């Protein structure tokens, strides 16, 4: 059976408050993307000690370090160098928090993607060395603002890279945002990527019929067939984490906040929105007799 976690900054920048909500809902873990208005790579030793102290005795595991690794420009050597340092800092953080998975991306999208494909693969040579050094898995998230936005394209990337240290972080709702590589999240995207999946994100979205543009909605109220997706996870024996990444707010987040999430403005109204989504999530799981 899969385990449930939540992004703490989808609740609050106050880590203690976020952990209290996760514990109230009897979740299995938390995912760390920003804490006390700091991204994970900026957490210092004092911050890390406080994170560990807050988690102590809760039974909550750190499901993933949601780093922004390689959410940068492929052709910018300075940005890439900076992101190698980000990966190493996040690997050290993962060690301190007894976490094996770090989230990563495939660079800001430039079209046509095919023209950049080999350069993307080549860019992962140095990260692979770091992953071996720290004994970590880099889970690549499909996201429409990056070169890999769908399950189908993520499966191709992982197959071409052919690296045991790099796996899939499946996000079905992100497929709804990809206008260039349209895909039905479930079953199509999931079937393409499931054999390489080490982690999963939960959010939901609709397409505005007037503008034909995507917008976030509470989980279970959008286009992702989550009931079938959850049933498939059980049938396929997936026992990793699925992590609620709410993204919906009563007052919609702007595109910049969605593409570069984190910090106080992003977390505003987060606890209310995440409670709505957790309630929806548990109703779906109850309907499937999974909780």
Image (cartoon, rainbow, N blue to C red):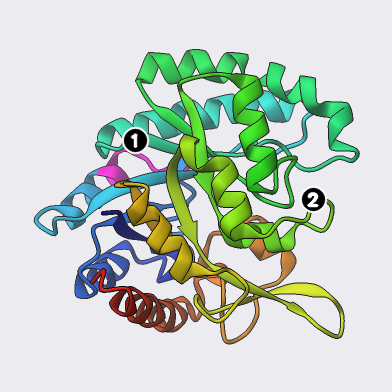
- Residue 33 visible? The answer is no
Neighbourhood count class around disc 2 (C-alpha, 10 Å): few under 14, some 14–19, many 20 upward:
some
Q: Which residue is mark 1?
A: 94
Relative to residue 15, is residue 147 drawn left or right? right
Q: Does the residue at mark 1 contact the one at mark 2 (Cβ under 8 Å)? A: no
Residue 214 lies in quadrant: bottom right
Q: Residue 46, percent across and down?
A: 28, 43
| Range drawn in magenta | 42-48
213 w.r.t. 96: above or below: below
Residue at 38% from the left image edge and 45% from the top image edge:
64
Q: For the residue labelled by badge 1, is the local secondary structure a helix, a strand or a loop?
A: helix
Q: Main secondary structure of the magenta part?
A: helix
In this view, 242 is above or below 272: above
- The answer to whether residue 277 shows anywhere in this view is yes
Q: Which residue is mark 2?
A: 181
Question: From the viewer's perspective, is 135 left or right of 181?
Answer: left
Q: Residue at horizontal 71%, vertical 30%?
A: 79
């Amino acid at each position: 059976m899969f385990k449930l976690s939540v992004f703490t900054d989808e609740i609050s920048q106050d880590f203690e408050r976020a952990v209290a909500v996760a514990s109230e809902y009897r979740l299995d873990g938390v995912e760390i993307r920003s804490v006390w208005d700091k991204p994970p790579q900026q957490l210092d030793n004092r911050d890390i000690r406080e994170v560990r102290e807050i988690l102590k005795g809760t039974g909550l595991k750190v499901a993933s370090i949601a780093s922004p690794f390689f959410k940068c420009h492929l052709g910018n050597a300075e940005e890439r160098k900076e992101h190698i340092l980000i990966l190493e800092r996040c690997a050290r953080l993962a060690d301190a928090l007894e976490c094996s998975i770090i989230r990563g991306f495939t660079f800001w999208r430039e079209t046509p993607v095919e023209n950049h494909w080999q350069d993307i693969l080549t860019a992962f040579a140095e990260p692979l060395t770091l992953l071996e050094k720290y004994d970590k898995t880099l889970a690549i998230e499909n996201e429409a603002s990056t070169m890999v936005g769908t399950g189908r394209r993520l499966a191709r990337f992982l197959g071409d890279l052919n690296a045991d240290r790099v796996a899939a972080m499946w996000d079905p709702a992100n497929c709804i945002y990809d206008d260039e590589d349209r895909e039905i999240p479930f079953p199509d995207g999931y079937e393409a990527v499931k054999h390489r999946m080490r982690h999963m994100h939960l959010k939901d979205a609709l397409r505005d019929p007037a503008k034909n543009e995507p917008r976030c909605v509470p989980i279970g109220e959008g286009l992702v067939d989550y009931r079938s997706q959850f049933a498939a996870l059980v049938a396929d024996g997936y026992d990793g984490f699925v992590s609620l990444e709410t993204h919906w707010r009563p007052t919609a987040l702007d595109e910049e906040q969605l593409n570069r999430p984190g910090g106080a403005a992003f977390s505003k109204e987060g606890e209310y929105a995440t409670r709505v989504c957790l309630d929806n999530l548990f109703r779906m799981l109850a309907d499937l007799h999974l909780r």
